[in-house]
Image (cartoon, rainbow, N blue to C red):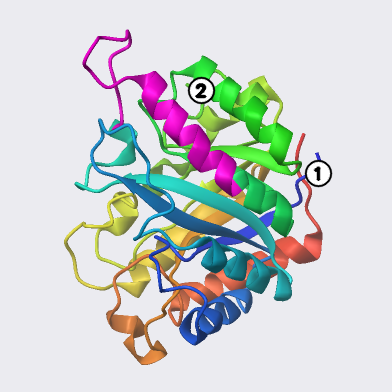
Amino acid sequence: MRFELDTVCGITWGWTGVRGTWANAQAEHSMEQMAETGANWTAIALAAVQETAQSTVIPYLEAPTVTDEETRWAIRQAKRLGLKVCLKPIVNCGNGTWRAHIAFFDQNVPGEPSWGEWFASYEKFILHYAAIAEEEGCEMLCIGCEMVQADKREAEWRSLIDRVRKLYGGLLTYNCDKYQEERLTWWDAVDVMSSSGYYPIHEWDAQLDRIEAAVRRWGKPFFFMEAGCPSREGSSLKPNDWSLPGGPSEAEQCAYYREMFARCGERSWMQGYMLWDWPAKLYGKQEAAGNGDYCFYGKEAERIVRDNYRALASRGLTKGE
């Protein structure tokens, strides 16, 4: 391990990593604006697209995935701006099925797709980006995101992690889905626990109590690899639903962020956030009030994030216990 995890005042940049949208003036402007929020980390997130949840080939070198040149450009831009980088390669399904539902029979069945075939392709995918993360000096690599059905394949994940460590010397994390923090059985194999913290605004204390038990059990640093809320009516009650109907509401987003920072700030083991999210192409500031998405650029929530991140940085928190 190259260093101990510091406080993560982070933002996810560039999702979904569509070819041709990085390594240009718009993307450079976006990242520069993100750096003005007080962030000290960014997760550079890109997606490779398999056809369906039962496909066993992940074509990560093909469009729409960003090129390796674009990926290296983004890492270098972030470092130029003084940001630590977590490279976050993610698999999506082309037919719209959420990656959490990628699954196969527990036992191999002749003629049917298998976990073995899928993990063989997934391993090539992750090892490819592990090599880039090592060459570009990324401080962290996220080896998977919200793979709920795949989480139970402990042997395959441990094998993958062993292979990754032969290529990459930085911190390793896995981004489990919300409500899954205590369910993973192989947290000991990574350096940092992380999850998607899209919890309803009134549930923070209860959910943090539950997560705390898992953090204490495994004795690992923890942060939210994803967390945030759309600026949309009703979203504070269902922050994971990006398609929730409702008109734009900066007040809804602000209330959520205030509560999240307040409740999480009471927990000594909480080491930060990688807020969701900041696109490679920003909307104009004059459009912010009418934008109902997660990005808080030009919105009132940007000030809340900046104030909280600057406070965390000034206190120099390194809370891992």
Q: Secondary structure at mark 2?
A: loop
Is residue 293 placed above or below 146 in the rendered structure?
below
Asked if residue 303 can be seen in this view, the reply is yes
Front one among 194 and 255? 194
Please give left or right for residue 139 compared with residue 115 in the image.
Answer: right
Q: Residue at x 71, y 66 (%)?
A: 311
Is residue 29 placed above or below 215 in the rendered structure?
below
Front one among 118 and 208? 118
Q: Secondary structure at mark 1?
A: loop
Please give left or right for residue 263 compared with residue 207 in the image.
Answer: right
Residue with the mark numbered 1? 4
Asked if residue 269 can be seen in this view, the reply is no
Is residue 309 placed above or below 169 in the rendered structure?
below
Please give left or right for residue 137 compared with residue 226 in the image.
Answer: right
For the image, the number of numbered tags is: 2
Dot 1: few (<14), some (14–19), or many (≥20) neighbours within 10 Å? few
Examine the structure image and report whether residue 56 is included in the region drawn in magenta: no
Label placed on residue 264: none
Residue 275: image location, x then y, percent: 51, 59
Residue with the mark numbered 2? 184
Front one among 177 and 114? 114
Give the extent of the magenta segment.
102-129
Residue 185: image location, x then y, percent: 54, 18
Position of the C terminus, as image quadrant, is top right
Examine the structure image and report whether residue 127 is included in the region drawn in magenta: yes
Q: Amino acid at mark 1?
A: Glu
Q: Residue at x 34, y 63 (%)?
A: 230
Dot 2: few (<14), some (14–19), or many (≥20) neighbours within 10 Å? some
Q: Amino acid at mark 2?
A: Leu
Q: Residue at x 72, y 33 (%)?
A: 166
